[in-house]
Amino acid sequence: MRTYSLDLRERVVRAVDRGEQTRQQIAERFGVGTTWIKKLLRQREETGSIAPKPHGGGMPAKYRGKALERLKKALAAQPDATLEELRDRVKVKASLMAVSRALDRLGARRKKSRSGPRNKIGRMSR
């Protein structure tokens, strides 16, 4: 979800302060929700600012630093290893999605191994 610009925030607060319309009408006019307007006004009361709050962060990546280097080496040693095999080799307790995201950050392209049998269905002639 994108953060609303400071310009939009200022225009909405200015419209509410002037009492030009109801909050519902202001919300429709600017394409925002009435709940967002209420939160914005509460933030202004509590902090004195209508600027967007900083991003809360999130979970840090499981594969970073040395673990990411070990993953890179494991991938170089066996390029056709599955995500599960790579995770087990690196010995990091993480989900398969975490392994996949780490490989994306490394720029590793995952391809199926060509060592498997070819498809028995040939091209159809017309």
Image (cartoon, helix red, strand yellow):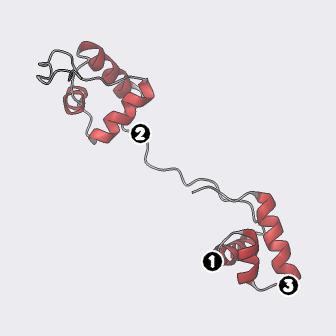
Residue 31 placement, left or right of 110 = right
* Position in image of residue 89 (x %, y %): 21, 26
Extreme-right residue of the structure: 18
Up the image or down, 44 lies above or below 106; here it is below
**SS label for mark 2:** loop
Where is mark 1, residue-wise? 35
- Circle 3: element type: loop
Q: Are marks 2 and 3 in contact (CB under 8 Å)?
A: no
Identify the residue at horizontal 21%, vertical 21% (top origin). 125
Q: Is residue 11 left or right of residue 74?
A: right
The quadrant holding residue 110 is top left
Q: Amino acid at mark 1?
A: Thr
**Image coords of residue 108 (percent x, y):** 38, 22
**Viewer-nearest residue: 6 or 56:** 6
Dot 2 or dot 1: first in sequence order is: 1
Q: Quadrant of the N terminus?
A: bottom right
For marks 3 and 1, the one nearer the N-term is: 3
Residue placed most toward the observer, 119 or 28: 119
Image position, residue 34 (x, y; %): 66, 78
* Label 2 sits on residue: 61
Horizontal relation, residue 2 to residue 28: left or right: left
Point out the tag, 2 or 3, that comes first from the N-terminus.
3
Q: Which residue is mark 3?
A: 19
Q: Amino acid at mark 2?
A: Ala
How much space separates mark 3 and mark 1, taking CA atoms?
Answer: 17 Å
Q: Is residue 60 above or below residue 28?
A: above
Quick one: which residue is furthest to the front in this view?
Answer: 126
Drawn side of residue 116 relative to residue 77, left or right: left
Residue 124 position in % (x across, y down): 20, 23
Under mark 3, the amino acid is Gly
